[in-house]
Image (tube, rainbow, N blue to C red):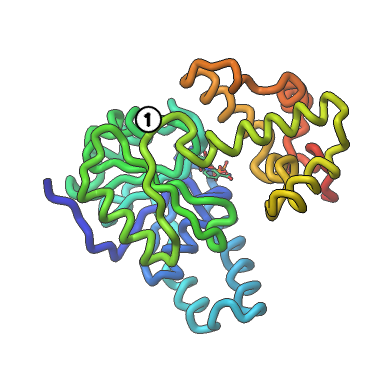
Amino acid sequence: MNIRTTVRTVGVVGTGTMGSGIAQTFAQAGRAVLMYDALPGAVDKALAGIAKSLDKLVEKQKLAADVAGATRKNLRSASLGDLAGVDLLVEAVFEDVAVKRALYGELAKLLAPDVVLASNTSSISISELAAASGRPAQFIGMHFFNPVPLMKLVEVVVGLQTAEPVVEFTMNLSRELGKTPLRVKDHPGFVSNRVLMPLINEAIACLADGVADAATIDEVMKLGMAHTMGPLATADLIGLDVCLNIMEVLHRDLGLDKYAPHPSLRTMVRAGQLGRKSGKGFFSYGQ
Ligand SMILES: NC(=O)c1ccc[n+]([C@@H]2O[C@H](COP(=O)([O-])OP(=O)(O)OC[C@H]3O[C@@H](n4cnc5c(N)ncnc54)[C@H](O)[C@@H]3O)[C@@H](O)[C@H]2O)c1
C-alpha cells in the first residue's frame, strides 16, 4: 500500500472549537491548511479566533511574531472541492456518526488514493468510520485535546484495519507538530474518555449525594490528586451534552452498568445547562 507521507497541504474539515485549533497547529508547523466547514461563516469565525489566539501567544512571548505572521498566511478558506489537492485530511465535524459517515462518502470520491484520513472523534469507533471511508487501511484516529495549540497529547487511535505504516506516519507527524503521540487501540472511549468520564460521573454522584458542594469536590481532586482542573470544571469545559453523549457510548458499547450516566447529568442537559458554552453547568460563567 502506498501512502503519502510528505505533507505540504492539510485539509481540515469542520472548523469549530477543535478544527480551528487543529488548523492553527498545522499552520504553525509550516503546513498550508485548507479549511472547510459546511456552515456559512464558520471558517471566517475560526480565522478570527485563530488570529486572536496568535496575538495572545505573541503577547505572552510564547510565539515569535514572524512565525505568527507565517501561520496566518498558511491558512485558507476552501470549498469541499478544493480539498481534492490535499496531502492529508483531518476531520473535526459534529460528533454524529451519520454526519461523519456521509462526509467520508463524499471525501472518498474526492481525495487522491494515497491520502491518509484522520478523525478527531472523541468516542465514535474509528473502525466504523474507516469502513465508511472506503480506505480503512489508511484511516486513523488523531484525537487532539482542547485547546489544541496548548495541549500536548495526541491520542493516536488505531482501527482494526489501520495499516502499520499509517500509524508510524501519524506518530511522526504528531511529533513534528510539537505534540506527544500516544498509541491506543480503537475501543469505546479509547483511554482518555474511558478513564475521564467515569471520574466525572462519580464526581456528579458525590454532588447529588450531598457529599460536598461542586467547588469542594473539585478542590479535593486538585489539591489531593494534583489535577490541574477539577472533574466538574472539566465537564463544564467539555460540555455536559458532549459528556453525556460519550457516557452513553461507553455504557452501550461496553455493556456495563458502571458506565451508566448519572441521572442528574441527563436532567442538566435536558434543562439546557451545558457548561461554559451555555453560561451555566456545575459552575456559572459570566456571558
Ligand atoms: N470539544 C472538545 O473538547 C473535543 C475534544 C476532542 C475531540 N473532539 C471531537 O472533535 C469533533 C468536533 O468537535 P468540536 O467540539 O470542535 O465541535 P464544534 O461543534 O465546535 O464544531 C463542529 C464543526 O463541524 C461543522 N460541520 C458539521 N457537519 C459538517 C460537514 N458535514 N461538513 C463540514 N463541516 C461540518 C460545523 O458547522 C461546526 O463548525 C467531534 O468529533 C468531537 O467529538 C472534541
Viewer-proximal residue, 220 or 20?
220
Say which quarter of the image contains residue 246: top right
- Position above or below: 286 against 273: below
The residue drawn where x is 69% and y is 54% is 226
Q: Which residue is mark 1?
A: 102
- Position above or below: 68 against 256: below
Q: Is residue 184 visible?
A: yes
Viewer-proximal residue, 61 or 226?
226
User: Residue 73, percent across and down?
Assistant: 44, 73
Which amino acid, mark 1? Ala
Q: Is residue 233 left or right of residue 149?
A: right
User: Residue 8, percent across and down?
Assistant: 29, 65
The residue drawn where x is 32% and y is 31% is 127
Q: Is residue 41 visible?
A: no
User: Residue 222, percent across and down?
Assistant: 74, 51
Q: Is residue 36 left or right of residue 161?
A: right
